[in-house]
């Protein structure tokens, strides 16, 4: 038995106390303390009692002359964290350079830190019938004449149907009066009893599974092999849209459950969580649970506990579900793995795929990354052998990929069409709707007009607080800033020259909607973007209405790219394919490719042939060409070549720094000083330092933003170097009023 433990303070918010502290274990606690449990310890000079996590056991003290204080008592009845989670916290500390306390905060559901952790209650109080059924009937008949018996009768009739009812259930019922219940217990007609509650997992519902086609079966067999293997294996399930990927990983999960394991399925936040849940429940019943960010802390804590105790065996959720303390976790599936939502935007800025891989490596499980358009990172790993490729190349039911037509919008202008919808797309919409089919249109910007400016002097209305054009919103009637939320009334004259020639340019979803209403209102128009999906189920409701043909044209932002099948959607239009193509981000081509490919995958998924029209001002762009001819592999290969040439990820690791503050001069001066530190410690030239430069959006909410970028080949070195120089800078320089935000492996360059 170990005599000492090393702990992390529960409250360790600052880096100074975010380290292991050693305590001795008093004799009476020796056999009781476990890893992941919390204990009370005396801390600091005043010996104030603090709660701390047990991280590590020690047999001997590292330094003899050190005065060691004993643990005072246990805080949790059973460990709050299992050993795997403690190791996961260590990983997060090392991999993301965060504090231990931050890592623990990430792993635990909100609010869990305050209360002691107890096992789920094993028994429940039941109220039982204490006399025979017949005797009870007679009793009711005898007493019924009395008026005072009404309340008692309401209770007793329940016990004619059931012999025992949980007390909690009776308490919830409005007809049950507490005092009458007590009277009946006193009269010994009913009695209280503590009963053992055992969770009964639903059996797997095999009839609900689809019969897989040959290709799916081959994919499934490959995954089965990985699951049977006791070592870690990563798989890339790369299947074109509508090829039945979900069915394949559903059968993989089935196998995991049959073998007594559990699984986590990550989905992008925006996806149709309800539909996904139903699809899983149909097959696996009550062992499936869904977690999401809109859930209250109580519900999240209960899920945590049910998962930890092995009642929940399939957890579905957004990126934070990757931390769930599943019992015998054997499989993690990341659906639509290329989605940006898998990277956290708050410190520690973890990527769910990294965490998932780590967990599966630790437990010898399998990781499935599923997508029709993998991230370049995953594609590269597949090429290097770190991920095994599991391909699906055919659509279910023999559905074919849609025909793609590219429309040159420059020509459209030459022909005198100033509208945002080309004549080809207009005709196709008309034809599709007349035939009783449905249309989806992608416009990846919300609002009506994306900039407003003066025809006379060129003045553009920018946000007062940000370096970004204001967007006109028809719905609200205001100009809105998409970065800080600032609103303004529309100027009637130019604030700069007084001219009345204020004009609106650029387009968003509202403008497309306006166009559609002018021509196709009779068919019903729906718009899906951030502004129309705010409610709890806003997103699902809209899609359900679309599926029921309550409207037949759906225009929306990237939200429409995902979701369940709409067999009647035969036309998909991409209104402005160039939108994201020329952004200052080396991933903009990859992103555009993924978004367009995913969206056009919505067309013709049923028995009807699909059709796609892509509108662009640069029809010769390589990205669109590869999309048109379905040359995915070519596209990825070319992107990789380019990344390699430029030394970008996945061939390097980035450490990005954003220096921000209200005083522009100070920000610029400090970011340059910061750069000196990086140069000074880069004598061997292992790292590339890019910048400093004003960030793409150089001011947000009155704060100026400058960026510095470090690149290197080895991740660990990049992280150490990035943090080391930053700490030197912070310790030696007067940082004034600036803030510094850093990120390792950023997925976005803003
Ligand atoms: P993906 O995830 O690749 O987009 P899904 O797994 O959602 O594809 O499948 C697309 C549609 O095809 C779903 O409606 C699904 O129920 C159906 N499907 C998938 N596999 C089969 C199969 N083997 N037999 C019949 N229908 C299937
Ligand atoms: Zn003007
Ligand atoms: Zn703003």
Image (tube, rainbow, N blue to C red):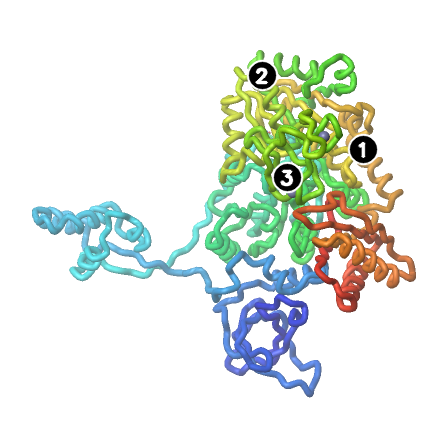
Across and down, in percent, residue 315 comes to 55, 48
Please determine whether, in this image, residue 521 is positioned above or below residue 260: above
Across and down, in percent, residue 664 comes to 75, 52
Q: CA distance from mark 2 to mark 3?
A: 27 Å
* Front residue (pair 123, 375): 375
Q: Which residue lies under the disc numbered 1?
A: 635
Q: Residues within 10 Å of mark 1 (few under 14, many from 20)?
A: many
State which mark lies toward you, 1 or 3.
3
Q: CA distance from mark 1 to mark 2?
A: 38 Å
Are the two marked residues, 1 and 2, in contact with CB atoms closer than 8 angstroms?
A: no
Please determine whether, in this image, residue 278 is positioned above or below residue 423: below
Q: Residue at 17% across / 50% down in the picture?
A: 151
Residue 269 is left or right of residue 698, and the answer is left
Q: Farthest residue in the front direction? A: 498
Residue 250 is left or right of residue 635, and the answer is left
Residue 134 is left or right of residue 497, and the answer is left
Tell me if I can see residue 506 in this picture. yes
Q: Kindly tell me whether mark 3's CB lies below 8 Å from ligand 3.
A: yes
Across and down, in percent, residue 634 comes to 82, 32
Q: Which residue lies under the disc numbered 2?
A: 518
Q: Residue at 71% across / 17% down in the picture?
A: 418
Q: Residue at 62% across / 83% down in the picture?
A: 68
Q: Secondary structure at mark 2?
A: helix
Task: Please report whichever mark, 1 or 2, sits nearer to the chain's N-terminal start.
Answer: 2
The C terminus - image quarter: top right
Q: Which residue lies under the disc numbered 3?
A: 481
Q: CA distance from mark 1 to mark 3?
A: 35 Å
Q: Secondary structure at mark 1?
A: helix
Task: Please report whichever mark, 1 or 3, sits nearer to the chain's N-terminal start.
Answer: 3
State which mark lies toward you, 2 or 3.
3
């Amino acid at each position: 038995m170990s005599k000492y433990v090393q702990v992390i303070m529960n409250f360790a918010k600052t880096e100074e106390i975010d380290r292991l502290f050693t305590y001795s274990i008093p004799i009476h606690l020796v056999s009781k303390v476990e890893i992941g449990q919390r204990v009370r310890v005396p801390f600091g000079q005043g010996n104030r009692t603090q709660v701390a996590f047990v991280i590590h056991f020690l047999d001997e003290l590292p330094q003899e002359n050190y005065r060691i204080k004993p643990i005072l008592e246990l805080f949790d009845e059973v460990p709050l964290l299992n050993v795997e989670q403690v190791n996961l916290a260590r990983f997060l500390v090392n991999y993301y350079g965060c504090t231990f306390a931050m890592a623990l905060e990430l792993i635990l559901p909100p609010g869990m830190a305050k209360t002691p952790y107890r096992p789920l209650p094993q028994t429940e109080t039941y109220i039982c019938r204490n006399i025979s059924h017949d005797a009870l009937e007679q009793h009711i008949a005898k007493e019924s004449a009395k008026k005072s018996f009404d309340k008692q009768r309401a209770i007793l009739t329940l016990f004619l149907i059931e012999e025992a009812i949980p007390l909690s259930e009776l308490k919830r019922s409005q007809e049950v009066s507490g005092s009458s219940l007590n009277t009946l217990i006193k009269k010994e007609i009913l009695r209280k009893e503590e009963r053992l509650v055992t969770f009964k997992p639903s059996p797997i519902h095999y009839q609900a599974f689809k019969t897989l086609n040959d290709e799916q079966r081959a994919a499934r067999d490959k995954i089965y092999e990985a699951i049977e293997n006791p070592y870690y294996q990563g798989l890339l399930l790369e299947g074109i849209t509508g090829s039945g990927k979900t069915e394949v990983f559903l059968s993989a999960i089935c196998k995991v459950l049959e073998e007594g394991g559990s699984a986590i399925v990550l989905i992008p936040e925006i996806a149709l969580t309800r539909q996904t849940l139903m699809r899983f429940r149909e097959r696996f019943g009550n062992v499936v649970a869904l977690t999401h960010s809109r859930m209250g802390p109580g519900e999240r804590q209960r899920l945590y506990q049910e998962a930890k105790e092995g009642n929940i065996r399939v957890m579905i959720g957004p990126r934070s579900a990757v931390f769930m303390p599943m019992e015998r976790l054997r499989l993690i599936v990341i659906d639509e793995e290329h989605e940006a939502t898998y990277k956290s935007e708050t410190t520690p800025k973890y990527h769910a795929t990294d965490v998932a891989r780590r967990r599966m490596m630790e437990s010898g499980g399998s990781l499935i990354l599923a997508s029709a358009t993998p991230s370049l990172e995953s594609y590269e790993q597949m090429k290097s052998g770190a991920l095994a490729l599991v391909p699906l190349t055919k659509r279910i039911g023999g559905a074919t990929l849609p025909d793609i037509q590219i429309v040159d919008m420059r020509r459209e202008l030459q022909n005198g069409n100033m509208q945002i919808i080309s004549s080809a797309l207009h005709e196709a919409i008309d034809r599709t709707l007349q035939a009783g089919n449905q249309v989806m249109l992608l416009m990846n910007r919300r609002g009506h007009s994306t900039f407003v400016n003066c025809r006379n002097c060129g003045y553009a209305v920018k946000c007062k607080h940000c370096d970004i054009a204001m967007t006109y919103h028809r719905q609200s009637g205001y100009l809105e800033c998409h970065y800080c939320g600032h609103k303004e009334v529309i100027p009637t004259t130019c604030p700069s020259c007084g001219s009345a020639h204020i004009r609106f340019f650029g387009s968003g979803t509202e403008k497309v909607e306006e166009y559609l209403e002018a021509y196709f209102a009779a068919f019903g128009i729906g718009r899906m973007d951030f502004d129309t999906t705010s409610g709890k189920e806003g997103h699902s409701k809209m899609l359900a209405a679309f599926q029921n043909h309550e409207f037949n044209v759906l225009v929306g932002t990237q939200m429409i790219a995902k979701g369940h099948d709409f067999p009647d959607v035969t036309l998909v239009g991409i209104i402005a394919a160039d939108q994201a193509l020329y952004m200052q981000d080396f991933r903009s081509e990859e992103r555009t490719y993924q978004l367009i490919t995913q969206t056009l995958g919505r067309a013709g998924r049923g028995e009807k042939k699909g059709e796609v029209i892509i509108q662009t001002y640069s029809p010769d762009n390589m990205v669109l060409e590869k999309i048109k001819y379905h040359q995915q592999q070519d596209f990825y290969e070319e992107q990789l070549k380019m990344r390699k040439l430029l030394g970008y990820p996945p061939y390097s690791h980035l450490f990005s720094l954003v220096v921000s503050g209200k005083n522009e001069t100070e920000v610029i001066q400090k970011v340059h000083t910061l750069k000196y530190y990086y140069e000074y410690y880069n004598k061997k030239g292992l790292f590339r330092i890019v910048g400093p430069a004003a960030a793409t959006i150089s001011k947000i909410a009155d704060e100026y933003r400058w960026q510095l970028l470090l690149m290197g080949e080895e991740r660990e070195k990049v992280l150490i170097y990035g943090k080391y120089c930053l700490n030197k800078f912070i310790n030696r320089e007067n940082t004034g009023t600036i803030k510094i935000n850093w990120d390792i492996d950023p997925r976005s360059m803003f």
